[in-house]
Amino acid sequence: MNLVIQSAHPIAATHLDHLARLAQSRQREQIAEHAWRLTAAQAHDGIAPYCMANRLDYGFVPHDRKPGDFGLLVMDMDSTLISIECIDEIADMHGLKPRVAAITEAAMRGDIDFAESLRRRVALLEGLDEHALQRVYDERLKLNPGAGIMLAKLKELGIKTLLVSGGFVFFTDRLKATLGLDYTHANKLEIANGKLTGKVVGTVFDAQGKADWLVKIREELNLRPEQVIAMGDGANDLKMMAKAGISIAYHAKPVVREQASYALNFIGLDGLVNLLAN
């Protein structure tokens, strides 16, 4: 195995020296501006706490891994591909952000069933003008750092992208068109006479829905589970992450970090690229 070390800033030689000693690695190479590979590395209990204390991300990568080993990236939207929780920002237009955000946070930790949490949050939005959705998209929605680099590299490699969200198609449809994503799926807000009704159209697209869509698109592409990467940040992403060969916890809740193949705690989404090959 090789050990990939990444940071949002230049990595001090002292950090690399210490990690190389722990991993019993005798060779290192720089693979990106703020990323290094320590070859023939061994696992050590001291690596994880040292990296966390020094704001470094790490991952053990098979020496023979190739980008061609993968064919699909499935990713969450809110707080993963983008930096906001859309429903919290919609609620802010209604003066209800603290109440809605508290329910969102509990759902992402896994304290509340997602479908129930979504219904409760959407109900609070009843009567809001539908133009608030466009305002959130125009004024507040931002991609997380490194998203452009990651998506460009995936397109170059021929890896398809599926964006799944417990949020809303209003946002996933626009991101699909803007970013050139291959597939998207999310919930639809009910709107009547230009106002949100406080309801979701149809069945809530929840954790199981995300997992089912991963399998659906994977089968359409004739891929094996090990050819799929899944990325998310909250408890609602765990079922889909369990269906993928590699799972990435992006700036995630502890329950997600603990179950993921890799955790990107400090760097941007482009950190995924350095884990795809050696």
Image (cartoon, rainbow, N blue to C red):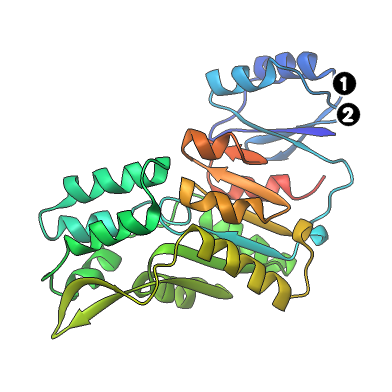
Residue drawn at (61%, 22%) of the image: 51
| Whether residue 65 is visible | yes
- In the picture provided, is 27 more to the left or to the right than 86? right
Secondary element at image label 1: loop
* Amino acid type indicated by mark 1: Arg
- In the picture provided, is 179 more to the left or to the right than 200? right
Numbered badge on residue 7: none
Percent x, y for residue 21?
A: 79, 13
Numbered badge on residue 26: 1
Q: Is residue 105 above or below residue 188?
A: above
Judge depth for marks 2 and 1 and give the one in front.
Answer: 2
Percent x, y for residue 77?
A: 45, 59
Secondary element at image label 2: loop
- Which quadrant holds the C terminus? top right
Percent x, y for residue 210?
A: 53, 63
Numbered badge on residue 40: 2
Residue drawn at (64%, 48%) of the image: 247
